């Protein structure tokens, strides 16, 4: 192995995962709460230290936050990092992802150059996954996201990366930025006294970074409101024998009408696809970034553009579609360019340069997060990650999204406004009348900095997004007994999903994970078995028509956020459910 690597790791401090909440201004509440290193960042630190040692290099950890965030650096140094940099200043308070990325990029330029910048895949408080691709764009570096396995050969990185539907194998040259998957390595976690690292911590203020603007002033997105209340559910916790509870639960389900509803059904007053002519969004033009092979989510985004009242909807994609199909889905025109996220972001920037305003929607997938984050960093535009509801107010894009503490209303205050949208949470509107969208080509020079040698699809996320019924399992269901769930899945024609703890253990693919750090779904019915029902999971089924929970603990929090709750072991309840549902459906 030739050459040592100088490595920078980006780490974040958050309140303990079970104690996450937001203040009314949308910032994480830290005072009086136990704090820890973000779980994703623990893998980044471990991978950064491991790679530095393997190459004979050095590892420096950076964190941005209040003075208390120095504890993150102490733990990293105790784990084996050479030193740490604390970026702290009251001026930096209120930074959104772009302002955070700008501050981190400025510090890296000041202290660099670095061969490799390592970040976690996301953060447990919001998990937008935007900072790493924005730092990559600001430093003009290639990016590999969701790195599960990493091999360094001289100045070349070979990686196996997790994707939404499986994995890909790719390589790039350093310098580069990577984000590491949660299962990439054991986490950095040092329980003992960590004060010995104080002499190796450098403190930077905004004055050290340059003129800015920094913090809230330099943030093009703003949290306007936070709703901490759980979604309104009937909260009926049943009692009695398992058979009696199940009979009552199925009766409540039947009375709700959920079984006759489609998945992702439009609510009252939903928009319809129509020819151009709306006035909802600033500039009147909505550009949809389409990921190749993700037709379902592309249709959701085109439907969302119609709901926003777009004057014109432009579909920007990497593969030439049928013009009649594109029109029926809601595209008024199509622009075809290279499919790679970085190249498509370049094409989008060129399209938006002349107009100066506009709204951009991208899928909340691995590909979409990189494309939208790079575009936002390039344009200095506001980007809301993982939006679940889109609105307009005075020509501004306004999004509602899940956080660890509840729902947050985030508005965008920049000429170009961006959002990534969680797949599966918005309805697909009926096709519009016959027509054909004109198709043009945007020629951009391929960067070609990341070479993909293999793509493997292990699952189809569209199956879960489009499912009318979803059955979720927690760690209370033994994976060796999943076969016992088949009769329930069959009678409901349901897809199987899971909590984060299940996918962390590798019991089901990560693409089946529901919650803040997973997917959101909007089925007519969601059945949850053997899970406590924490908000971080239940936020992913906020739009479900009816929620039925099964848990043996009568005090489990899931019963307060379900429409009907059966207090029983899943193994007893499932056969009874199958019998009742067969009787109901014939």
Image: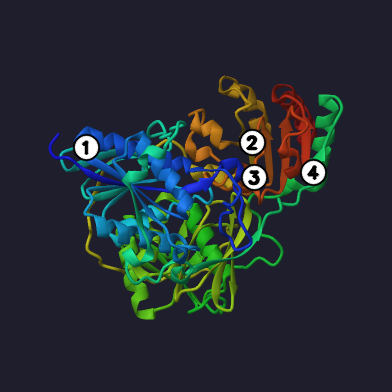
Which quarter of the rendering shows the N terminus? top left
Which residue corresponds to mark 1? Answer: 152
Q: Secondary structure at mark 2?
A: strand
**Residue 487, percent across and down?**
66, 26
- Contact? badges 1 and 2 (CB < 8 Å): no
The single residue placed furthest to the left in the displayed view is 2
- The Cα–Cα distance between marks 1 and 2, rounded to whole angstroms, is 41 Å
Which residue corresponds to mark 2? Answer: 471
From where the camera sits, is residue 456 visible? no
**Residue 89, percent across and down?**
43, 62
**Residue 117, percent across and down?**
30, 48
By what rule are the colours in the image chosen?
Answer: rainbow
The single residue placed furthest to the top in the displayed view is 480
Q: Which label was assigned to residue 235?
A: 4
Residue at 83%, 34% (x, y): give it: 238
- The Cα–Cα distance between marks 2 and 3, rounded to whole angstroms, is 17 Å
Which residue corresponds to mark 3? Answer: 535
Mark 4 or mark 1: which comes first in sequence? 1
- The Cα–Cα distance between marks 4 and 1, rounded to whole angstroms, is 53 Å
Residue at 45%, 49% (x, y): give it: 69
Mark 3 or mark 1: which comes first in sequence? 1
Q: Which marked residue is nearer to the observer: mark 4 or mark 1?
A: 1
- Contact? badges 4 and 1 (CB < 8 Å): no
The crowd level at tag 4 (other Cα within 10 Å; few <14, some 14-19, many 20+) is some
Q: In the image shown, does 114 or 495 lie closer to the viewer?
A: 114
Mark 2 or mark 3: which comes first in sequence? 2
- Contact? badges 2 and 4 (CB < 8 Å): no
Q: Is residue 432 above or below residue 45?
A: below
Q: In the image shown, does 284 or 503 lie closer to the viewer?
A: 503
Figure label count: 4
- The Cα–Cα distance between marks 3 and 4, rounded to whole angstroms, is 15 Å
Q: Secondary structure at mark 3?
A: helix
């Amino acid at each position: 192995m030739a050459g040592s690597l100088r490595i920078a790791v980006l780490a974040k401090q958050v309140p303990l995962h079970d104690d996450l909440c937001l203040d009314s201004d949308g910032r994480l509440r830290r005072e009086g709460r136990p704090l820890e290193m973000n779980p994703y960042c623990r893998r980044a630190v471990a991978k950064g230290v491991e790679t530095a040692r393997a190459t004979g290099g050095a590892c420096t950890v950076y964190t941005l936050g209040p003075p208390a965030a120095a504890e993150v650096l102490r733990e990293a140094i105790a784990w084996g990092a050479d030193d740490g940099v604390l970026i702290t200043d009251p001026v930096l308070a209120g930074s959104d992802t772009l302002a955070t990325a700008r501050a981190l990029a400025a510090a890296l330029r000041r202290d660099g150059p670095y061969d490799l910048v390592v970040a976690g895949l996301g953060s447990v408080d919001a998990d937008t996954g935007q900072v790493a691709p924005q730092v990559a764009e600001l430093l003009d570096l290639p990016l590999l996201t969701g790195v599960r396995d990493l091999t360094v050969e001289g100045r070349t990185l070979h990686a196996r990366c997790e994707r939404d539907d499986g994995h890909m194998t790719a390589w790039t040259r350093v310098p580069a930025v990577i984000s590491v998957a949660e299962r990439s390595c054991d986490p950095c976690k040092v329980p003992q006294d960590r004060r010995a690292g104080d002499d190796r911590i450098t403190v930077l203020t905004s004055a050290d970074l340059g003129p800015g603007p920094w913090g809230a002033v330099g943030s093009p997105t703003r949290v306007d409101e936070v709703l901490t209340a759980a979604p309104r559910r009937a909260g009926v916790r049943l009692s009695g024998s398992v058979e009696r509870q199940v009979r009552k639960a199925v009766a409540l389900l039947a009375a709700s009408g959920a079984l006759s509803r489609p998945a992702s059904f439009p609510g009252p007053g939903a928009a319809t696809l129509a020819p151009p002519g709306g006035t909802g969004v600033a500039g009147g033009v909505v550009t949809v970034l389409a990921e190749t092979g993700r037709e379902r989510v592309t249709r959701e985004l085109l439907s969302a553009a119609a709901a926003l009242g777009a004057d014109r909807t432009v579909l920007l994609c990497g593969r030439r579609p049928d013009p009649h199909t594109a029109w029926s889905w809601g595209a008024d025109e199509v622009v075809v360019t290279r499919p790679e996220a970085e190249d498509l972001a370049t094409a989008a920037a060129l399209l938006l340069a002349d107009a100066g305003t506009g709204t951009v929607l991208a899928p909340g997938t691995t590909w979409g997060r990189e494309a939208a984050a790079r575009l936002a960093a390039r344009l200095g535009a506001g980007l809301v990650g993982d939006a679940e509801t889109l609105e307009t107010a005075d020509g501004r894009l306004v999004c509602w999204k899940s956080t660890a503490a509840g729902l947050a209303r985030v508005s965008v205050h920049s000429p170009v406004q961006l959002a990534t949208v969680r797949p599966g949470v918005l309805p697909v509107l009926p096709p519009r009348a016959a027509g054909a969208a004109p198709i043009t080509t945007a020629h951009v020079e391929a960067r070609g900095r990341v070479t993909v040698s293999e793509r493997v699809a292990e699952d189809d996320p569209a199956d879960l997004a489009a499912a009318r019924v979803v059955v979720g399992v927690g760690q209370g269901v033994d994976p060796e007994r999943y076969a016992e769930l088949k009769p329930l899945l069959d009678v409901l024609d349901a897809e199987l999903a899971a909590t984060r703890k299940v996918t962390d253990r590798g019991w089901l693919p990560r693409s089946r994970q529901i919650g803040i750090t997973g997917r959101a779904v909007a089925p007519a019915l969601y059945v949850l078995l053997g899970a406590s029902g924490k908000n971080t999971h239940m936020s992913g089924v906020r739009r479900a028509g009816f929620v039925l929970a099964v848990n043996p603990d009568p005090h489990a929090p899931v019963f307060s956020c379900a429409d009907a709750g059966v207090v029983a072991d899943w193994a007893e309840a499932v056969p009874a459910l199958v019998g009742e549902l067969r009787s109901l459906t014939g």
